[in-house]
Image: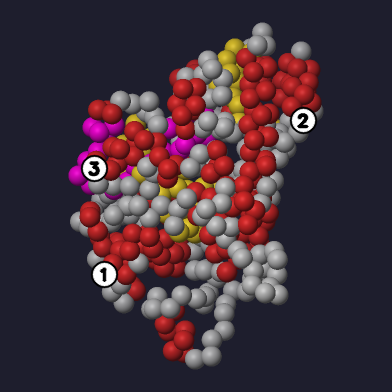
């Protein structure tokens, strides 16, 4: 499949039925798998043979869908997780342990920020947050001897900052560690971070990949490019024997291509168990089959709404990397030449009350804690996710009280604009 265009991969990669087999990916709704002899099963436990034994570790439905996502991102191996949160945690924890340090862009999803800054800190993993706009010198200064990974989001949720992937990859590699990029918002249809030097790519498949607000899920993709053995002292989990797996050295046995995902599955999925259900994987795949058709429409609607809002007298400011006036326009032209996504954020006159009454009057756009759905939805952080903060605190955090985040769906753009226009009026 690797020679085909991304459109074809969205539809067909990951699963090729043999003669007489189901055309659609079968949902293997089974927790377990049957073997004729204990020896047969023993080989699987020893990672001597590949196959299935328990769905917490692997399931054929999940593997087909993960293989498709690996192809879409241009990676060599992938796995599904139960959520985007699990994907980011597993990707980091697969190479970090108590005493490790992470360099992360400060402009990331709130859930991931908490994961790294609070929960992983309790595990003894430190973080230094850097501005996505930092200079190379500032970025390099954030590294320590115990730094094990660099993290960022291609387009950050909800700030809509665009990551200079090459800059972050260069710094990571100069310090002998991988760059992990959360590519949820653009999806591989609009950006493939591995082509710009990222080593590991993560997803909340809950968003555009599923695209219909139907199934929470996540994915991790390995580029197969990072040479763990060349930095063996930094990554003992991959380069020294795993006593919980009969002394396997993942990077020796599975090479650059297989080590990361195999360890993540064999160890973290075994012990922490955040597997995606095969039903969800099937639903996710239905979304992937039309991802290349949906993303341009999300972008078209986001761009049209952003342009309309930027000319409206009741709108103070619009943030959308596709607007020539946006701070990230130039960098978006480089990494996202076909556009980024359908999420637009804007500040309207009248603060909290203004945003609240505007949103109440919307007929098509629903108030939801969600983005990247086929249906347009919106959220005012000041009255929802950040409602414990005062107007002054919000302003200081760069989230003015009148800020609205709108995720443009797949409806007709004129209908969306008319709805916004009447609500603003
Ligand atoms: C939503 C989101 C997550 C978390 O994903 P869940 O599937 O909700 O766990 C992580 N990263 C980004 C960029 C997101 O938008």
Q: Earlier in the sequence, mark 2 or mark 3?
A: 3
- Indicate whether 224 appears above or below 417: below
Question: For mark 2, does the 10 Å Cα neighbourhood hold few (<14), some (14 to 19), or many (20 or more) residues?
Answer: few
Which quarter of the rendered picture does the C terminus lie within? top right
Examine the structure image and report whether residue 153 is included in the region drawn in magenta.
yes
Residue pictured at 42% horizontal, 45% vertical? 194
Q: Which residue, given by chain and number where applicable, does mark 3 sit on?
A: 175
Which secondary structure lies at badge 1? loop
Which quarter of the rendered picture does the N terminus lie within? bottom right
Task: Give the residue at the far top of this rendering.
Answer: 313
Which residues are the magenta region? Answer: 139-163
Name the image colouring.
secondary structure
Q: Which residue, given by chain and number where applicable, does mark 2 sit on?
A: 412
Q: Earlier in the sequence, mark 2 or mark 1?
A: 1
Task: Tell me the CA gap for discs 2 and 3.
Answer: 48 Å
Which secondary structure lies at badge 3? loop
The numbered disc on residue 241 is 1
Q: Position of residue 57 (x, y in %)?
A: 49, 68
Which secondary structure lies at badge 2? loop
**Does the rendering let one see residue 306?**
yes
Residue pictured at 46% horizontal, 86% vertical? 40
């Amino acid at each position: 499949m690797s020679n085909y265009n991304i459109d074809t991969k969205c539809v067909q990669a990951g699963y090729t039925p043999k003669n007489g087999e189901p055309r659609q990916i079968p949902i293997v709704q089974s927790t377990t798998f049957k073997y004729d002899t204990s020896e047969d099963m023993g080989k699987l436990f020893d990672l001597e043979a590949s196959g299935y034994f328990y769905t917490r570790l692997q399931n054929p439905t999940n593997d087909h869908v993960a293989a498709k996502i690996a192809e879409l991102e241009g990676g060599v191996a992938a796995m599904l997780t139960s959520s985007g949160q699990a994907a980011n945690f597993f990707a980091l924890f697969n190479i970090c342990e108590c005493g490790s340090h992470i360099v992360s862009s400060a402009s990331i999803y709130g859930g991931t920020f908490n994961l790294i800054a609070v929960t992983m800190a309790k595990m003894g993993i430190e973080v230094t947050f850097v501005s996505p706009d930092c200079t190379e010198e500032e970025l390099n200064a954030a590294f320590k001897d115990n730094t094990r990974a660099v993290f960022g989001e291609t387009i950050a949720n909800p700030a809509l900052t665009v990551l200079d992937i090459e800059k972050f990859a260069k710094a990571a590699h100069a310090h002998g560690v991988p760059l992990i990029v959360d590519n949820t918002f653009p999806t591989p249809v609009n950006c493939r971070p591995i082509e710009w030097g990222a080593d590991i790519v993560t997803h909340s498949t809950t968003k555009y990949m599923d695209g219909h607000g139907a199934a929470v899920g996540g994915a991790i993709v390995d580029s197969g490019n990072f040479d763990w053995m060349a930095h063996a002292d930094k990554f003992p989990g991959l380069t020294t024997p795993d006593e919980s797996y009969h002394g396997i050295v993942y990077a020796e046995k599975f090479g650059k291509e297989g080590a990361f995902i195999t360890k993540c599955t064999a160890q973290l999925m075994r012990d922490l168990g955040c597997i995606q259900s095969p039903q969800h994987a099937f639903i996710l795949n239905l979304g992937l089959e039309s991802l290349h058709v949906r993303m341009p429409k999300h972008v078209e609607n986001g761009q049209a709404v952003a342009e309309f809002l930027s000319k409206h007298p009741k709108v103070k400011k619009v943030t959308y990397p596709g607007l020539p006036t946006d701070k990230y326009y130039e960098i978006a032209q480089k990494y996202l030449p076909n556009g980024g996504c359908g999420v637009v954020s804007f500040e309207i006159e009248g603060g909290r009350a203004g945003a609240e009454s505007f949103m109440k009057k919307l007929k098509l756009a629903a108030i939801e804690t969600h983005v990247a759905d086929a249906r347009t939805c919106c959220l005012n952080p000041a009255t929802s996710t950040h409602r414990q903060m005062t107007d002054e605190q919000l302003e200081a955090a760069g989230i003015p009280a009148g800020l609205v985040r709108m995720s443009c769906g797949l409806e007709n753009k004129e209908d969306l604009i008319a709805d916004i226009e009447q609500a603003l009026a």
